[in-house]
Amino acid sequence: MRVIVNGACGHMGREIVRLVKEGYQGGELAAAVDAYGKENGVLTDLHGAPEADVVIDFSHHTAVGPLLAYACGKGLAVVIATTGHTEEERELIFAAANKIPVFFSANMSVGVALLCSLARQAAAVLKGADIEIVEIHHNRKADAPSGTALMLADAVRQARPELKNHCGRSGQCKRESDEIGISAIRMGGVVGTHEVMITTETQTITLKHEAYSRALFAEGALTAARFLLGKPAGLYDMQSMIGESGGTE
């Protein structure tokens, strides 16, 4: 599996490059690309990359247009692991999935995929419960709430479609019954913590996932890349992969 890593000089890009060079999931580095990269061996443009099987993107959501145009032109599978996409950018992703296999997930952790499933089940059983999501990330993260928190809210809405997101809370702001409260905390070097609290008048179920190392997400992205090989054009996510294989190993 020949892999192009886009955003290779970022924190996650470096992890991907390291794992590919170690042969994780049978990966072989076709090219490391970073628009702002000044390191030896790092290309600054995808169009200078050699032939490959898949592109893993950990750059920035604003790069998704040129990325997808390149992948569609080459017939390459794409793993999009960035977050914070605008509606217009999401439409580009959905359109590209008609031409190439696209793996699109706000979080590359299998544990988070399981957290989504459990949150959906709890919301379905405890009808009428208040649901709050708290996410914590490092102080360099730009977007809030996190893409994973929004993914968790979407999972809850599959069981309770009447709910709507309420991001942040301050001042005179009484909680409404149709809200999913989402709170974001930024501090230190926290890799990623997500907690879902489902509360009735008599009980609370708390579901929590903590990521200890960025290698977790790099492993998930490479597993997703392997999963895409040979797939027809379409939009895939972590639930697709878990449903097919029952895991990632």
Image (cartoon, rainbow, N blue to C red):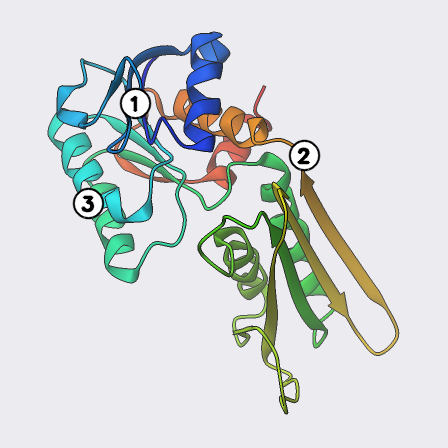
- The mark that comes first in sequence, 1 or 3, is 1
The residue closer to the viewer here, 95 or 54, is: 54
Mark on residue 54? 1
The quadrant holding residue 200 is bottom right
The residue closer to the viewer here, 82 or 12, is: 12
- Of discs 3 and 2, which sits in the foreground? 2
Query: What amino acid type should be assigned to the residue bearing mark 2?
Result: Tyr
Q: Are marks 1 and 2 in contact (CB under 8 Å)?
A: no
Q: Could you tell me residue 227's position as x and y percent?
A: 42, 24
Q: Could you tell me residue 233's position as x and y percent?
A: 25, 34
Reading the image, the residue beneath label 3 is 65
Q: In the picture, which quadrant includes the C terminus?
A: top right
Q: In the picture, which quadrant includes the N terminus?
A: top left
Mark on residue 212? 2
Query: Relative to 102, is 199 on the left or the right?
Result: right
Q: Is residue 186 above or below residue 57?
A: below
- Of discs 1 and 2, which sits in the foreground? 2
- The mark that comes first in sequence, 3 or 2, is 3
- The furthest residue to the right: 202
Q: Please give the name of the residue rendered at 22% of the width and 25% of the height, measured from the top-left corner.
A: 76
User: Within 10 Å of the Cα at label 2, are there few (<14), some (14-19), or many (20+) other Cα atoms?
Assistant: few
Query: What amino acid type should be assigned to the residue bearing mark 1?
Result: Val
